[in-house]
Image: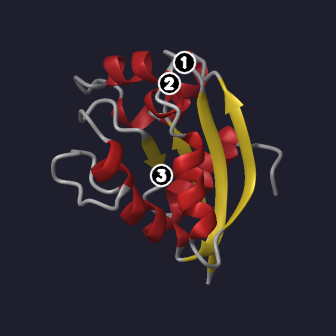
Amino acid sequence: MSQRTLVLLKPDAVRRGLIGEIIGRFEKKAGWTIRALELRELDRPLLEQHYAEHVGRPFYEPLVEFMSSGPSVALVVEGERVIEGVRALAGPTDPIAATPGSIRGDFGTIVRENLIHASDSEESAERELKIFFPDFS
């Protein structure tokens, strides 16, 4: 079953010049297609909507501050089991726990700046895609 997921290449990935490397990994995956891509500054209202479930947690403010610190790349990736697949390709949030070959395993440095966001379920993907690509169908 084909799915769509939101992927964000976070400000640290953009600053470090990893956009092409990371997108190339999606493009090489057989059956996955990039359906939309946009480099953009993420403002506080958008980030508050995206991270609403984390309000009140100790990492919320530093996360919003980091995500608004520079441009990010927002993508819609489509394909068979793409939600599960992109999360596996991203690797665990902790770069030390991430296996070599995963994005965070190969390029991650610290937990808070972890290069990539990928929707964690079909429900999250649907909600997040509406936030970042409201006119995309």
Give how far across and how far down residue 33 sits, in percent: 70, 66
Q: Front-most of 14 and 48?
A: 14
Residue contact between numbered discs 1 and 2, judged by CB atoms under 8 Å: yes
Q: Front-most of 126 and 91?
A: 91
Q: Indicate which disc, 3 or 2, sits on the residue closer to the N terminus.
A: 2
Label number found at residue 15: 2
Which secondary structure lies at badge 1? loop
Amino acid tagged 3: Ala
Quadrant in which the C terminus is drawn: bottom right
- Residue 70 appears in the figure: yes
Amino acid tagged 1: Gly
Give how far across and how far down residue 53 sits, in percent: 39, 37
Label number found at residue 104: none
Q: Which residue is mark 1?
A: 70
Q: Between tags 1 and 2, which lies in front? A: 2
Density class for disc 1 (Cα within 10 Å; few <14, some 14-19, many ≥20) is some
Density class for disc 3 (Cα within 10 Å; few <14, some 14-19, many ≥20) is many
Label number found at residue 118: 3
- Residue 3 appears in the figure: no
Q: Indicate which disc, 1 or 2, sits on the residue closer to the N terminus.
A: 2
Give how far across and how far down residue 44 sits, in percent: 55, 17
